[in-house]
Image (spheres, rainbow, N blue to C red):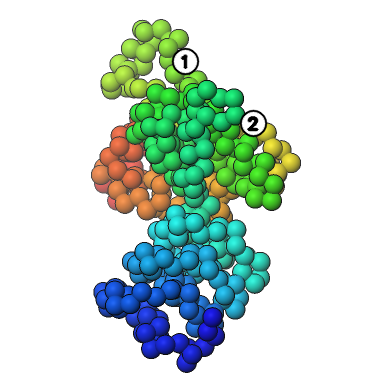
Amino acid sequence: MVSAMEDLSKFEQEIFQRISKNEVSELKTLLAQEKIKMDFIDENGMNPLQHACYKGNKEIVQLLLDHDADVNACLHEHAYTALHFAALSGNAELCHLLMSYGACLTAQNSVGRTAAQMAAFVGNHNCVATINNFIPKADIDYYIKPQGLQTEPMLPPYLADYFHKFIIQINVNPVRVCMNLQKLPALLENAAKIQKVLESMRNREMTRGVEINEIMAFKYHYLSCVVAEVLKCQKRQEAMKAEKVEKWCNRSNEKKPDTVEFLIRRFLKCNKTDSLPEYQEAFLKDSVREFPFRESTIFRQIVATLASTDPPSTVSVISAAINGQRGFFDGVHTCVTCGEDKATKKCSKCKAVQYCDRECQRLHWFMHKKACARLGQSSANN
């Protein structure tokens, strides 16, 4: 390995220059001229891939990965990996790309910090959440094959891609989790199997020895609780008398809701005194209490936060535990229905609440319509 720029060949130096200037097409032309290993480094021990990640250029990173750049190669003087640099760049999509190529999530730099911890340090919350929620496809593949004495897999193979899509989602608001499940009817039809797989994945994460991942274990547990609540709701609806369902539908002037939508409305319904979603809060706290690994750090932290004087909402505590703490978050542009960030739509009548889209607005209308009328009149008088 070389140790200084002057020791590099002109070809290698030019590669660094093209990356530094974000010249994608020129770099592509250059790499097409000659087959070369991407293991050469500059005076700081940075290879081309690390430079591209430092620049936050996903297209160049993909180009280098296509030329067999080692995603975990690291001779940097302070042990910053490509993923460290990507996390510091603030490019969450780039972080996901590197992890999909096998980037090590637990690699630490010279001060003992992982890529996610460095991203949190500089306030790149999207990168923190992306890294914390990354799940290798191989973790799913384990469940689509019979294990041990099993005669059939826990997860039917055709559900693997749907299931993977479901569990890598970053937004863990229970309403959004339900909406994601609703969009994947194949999972909904196999909810009982999905719940068992999630519980198994939770237990597996907590028995990995030195590679134990409490955050992911808790996320699997939480998702299994939401799926279990959907199953309970299905059973409750089946037991309800037809006239009660019809009476509810007539009162809301809407068509009969499906199981998931019925549960979403329960999560969204607030009490009249302090406008808190009572059912949602109770469900989330029960989910925390049911986490079986009570000696884990994540369980103790969540319980301590919820037991503090004037604690934040339980959904925000769970979200912070899974996705990492975020600073200077005022929630101004958060969807009032599902908690999604960067909600750009506003109620057309009162302009006071924000939504992701029409679907979130429709789901929340049964709660918002009375307040909307008051707010609309107030705006008109002003």
State the residue at coordinates (39%, 23%): 189
* Image: 84 above or below 229: below
Left or right, 330 with respect to 158, comes to right
State whether residue 83 is above or below residue 254. below
What number of labels is visible? 2
User: For residue 268, what is the image quadrant?
Assistant: top left
Q: Secondary structure at mark 2?
A: loop
Residue lying farthest to the front in this orientation? 35
In percent of width and height, residue 92 lies at 43, 59
**As shown in the figure, which amino acid type bears the numbered disc 1?**
Lys
Say which element carries label 1. Answer: helix
Vertical side of 92 occupied by 110: above or below: below
Please determine whether, in this image, residue 66 is positioned above or below residue 205: below
- Residue 373 in the figure: left or right of residue 134: left
Disc 2: which residue: 290
Q: Residue furthest bottom?
A: 6
Residue beneath disc 1: 235
Q: Is residue 63 left or right of residue 104?
A: left
Q: Quadrant of the N terminus?
A: bottom right
Q: Earlier in the sequence, mark 1 or mark 2?
A: 1
Residue sitting nearer the eye, 209 or 338: 209
Residue 122: x %, y % from top left = 53, 68
Real-space CA distance between mark 1 and mark 2, rounded to the nearest whole angstrom: 21 Å
